[in-house]
Image (cartoon, helix red, strand yellow):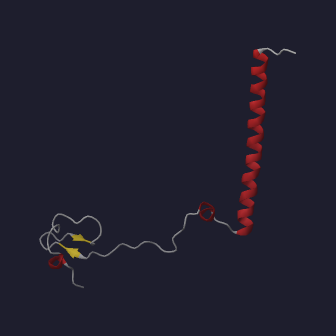
Amino acid sequence: MSTSYKSLLAQREALEKQIQEARDLERGQAVENIQEMMRIYDISVAELTGKKTRKYTKRPVPPKYRDPSSGKTWTGRGKPPVWIAGKNRDQFLIVH
């Protein structure tokens, strides 16, 4: 029983099409099942992915230092601006 090359290629193409159709169908059903289970058990996407959600919003940090000549401020976080770099920071402190 000898099958031609073209015939085998046609069979493979038909099989690949069937495989893709079956995968798409089963994948769609799986997604529906997962969504239903998430609704039933009140599961969030964050719980599934392991990403933690913040229970609070991040508030801006008030400035800690002020340049007396320009009035520019700096929170004390990150890279120091040119006007304070290498100087005694106590002279730039904002007193509340």
At horizontal 74% and vertical 31% (from top left) the residue drawn is: 16
At horizontal 11% and vertical 71% (from top left) the residue drawn is: 69
Q: Quadrant of residue 20?
A: top right
Q: Residue furthest right?
A: 1
Q: Is residue 30 left or right of residue 69?
A: right
Quarter of the image with the N terminus is top right
Q: Residue furthest bottom?
A: 96
Image height check: is 89 above or below 8? below
Q: Is residue 48 left or right of residue 21?
A: left
At horizontal 77% and vertical 46% (from top left) the residue drawn is: 26
Image height check: is 8 above or below 27? above
Quarter of the image with the C terminus is bottom left
At horizontal 76% and vertical 37% (from top left) the residue drawn is: 21
Q: Is residue 71 left or right of residue 54?
A: left
Q: Is residue 24 left or right of residue 68?
A: right
The one nearer the camera, 83 or 85, is: 85
Q: Quadrant of residue 22?
A: top right
Q: Residue furthest left?
A: 69
Residue 68 screen position, x and y as percent:
13, 74
Residue 44 screen position, x and y as percent:
64, 65
Image height check: is 83 above or below 34? below
**Number of marks in the rendered image:** 0
